[in-house]
Image (tube, rainbow, N blue to C red):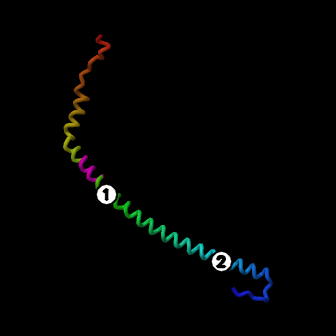
């Protein structure tokens, strides 16, 4: 570093402190940019697998929904008949404690 002999010593120190502060800020900014790049790469790498797993889960869920819908259509008449007979064909019987 070039030191101008005509400047007083306190001004030289102040100038050097300002230079050091500026250099530190630049280094911090470079480090931050590098870390952000690494984080974005890491995030992209790990979220890619999640997207594939999500698609697979959606396909499985869709298959199960279709299966349930087909079973519901197949058994719909029987279930409705059972419910109607349970409601309308009731045979009241007294509890065993009253018959006693």
Establish if 65 lies above or below 38. above
Q: Give the CA distance from mark 1 to mark 2.
A: 51 Å
Q: Give the class, few, some or many, for how many residues have Cα within 10 Å of label 2's Cα (few <14, many ≥20).
A: few
Question: Does the magenta segment cover residue 35?
Answer: no
Establish if 41 lies above or below 61. below
Quarter occupied by the N terminus: bottom right
Can you give x and y, in whole percent of width and height, for residue 6 in the image? 79, 89
User: Which residue corresponds to the image point at 32% horizontal and 59% vertical from the top-left?
Assistant: 55
Can you give x and y, in whole percent of width and height, for residue 58 in the image? 32, 56
In the rendered structure, the answer to whether residue 13 lies left or right of residue 67 reads right
In the rendered structure, the answer to whether residue 17 lies left or right of residue 81 reads right
Main secondary-structure element of the magenta-colored stretch? helix
The residue identified by callout 2 is 22
The stretch of residues the image draws in magenta is 61-68
Quarter occupied by the C terminus: top left
Q: Secondary structure at mark 1?
A: helix
Q: Give the class, few, some or many, for how many residues have Cα within 10 Å of label 1's Cα (few <14, many ≥20).
A: few
Of callouts 1 and 2, the N-terminal one: 2
Q: Using the image as rendered, state which of residue 67 and residue 30 is in the foreground.
A: 30
User: Which residue corresponds to the image point at 75% horizontal and 78% vertical from the top-left?
Assistant: 14
In the rendered structure, the answer to whether residue 12 lies left or right of residue 67 reads right
Q: Using the image as rendered, state which of residue 90 and residue 30 is in the foreground.
A: 30
Residue 56 image label:
1
Establish if 82 lies above or below 65. above
Mark 1 touches mark 2? (CB < 8 Å): no
User: Which residue corresponds to the image point at 70% horizontal and 78% vertical from the top-left?
Assistant: 18
Establish if 75 lies above or below 8. above
User: Which residue corresponds to the image point at 52% horizontal and 70% vertical from the top-left?
Assistant: 35
Can you give x and y, in whole percent of width and height, for residue 21 in the image? 67, 75
Q: Secondary structure at mark 2?
A: helix
Residue 89 image label:
none
Can you give x and y, in whole percent of width and height, for residue 74 in the image? 19, 43
């Amino acid at each position: 570093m070039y030191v101008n002999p005509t400047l007083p010593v306190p001004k030289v120190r102040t100038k050097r402190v300002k230079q050091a502060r500026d250099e530190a800020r630049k280094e911090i900014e470079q480090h931050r940019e590098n870390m952000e790049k690494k984080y974005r790469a890491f995030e992209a790498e790990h979220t890619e697998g999640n997207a594939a797993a999500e698609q697979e889960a959606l396909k499985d869920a869709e298959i199960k929904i279709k299966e349930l819908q087909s079973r519901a259509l197949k058994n719909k008449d029987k279930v409705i008949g059972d419910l109607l007979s349970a409601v309308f064909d009731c045979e009241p019987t007294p509890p065993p404690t009253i018959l006693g």
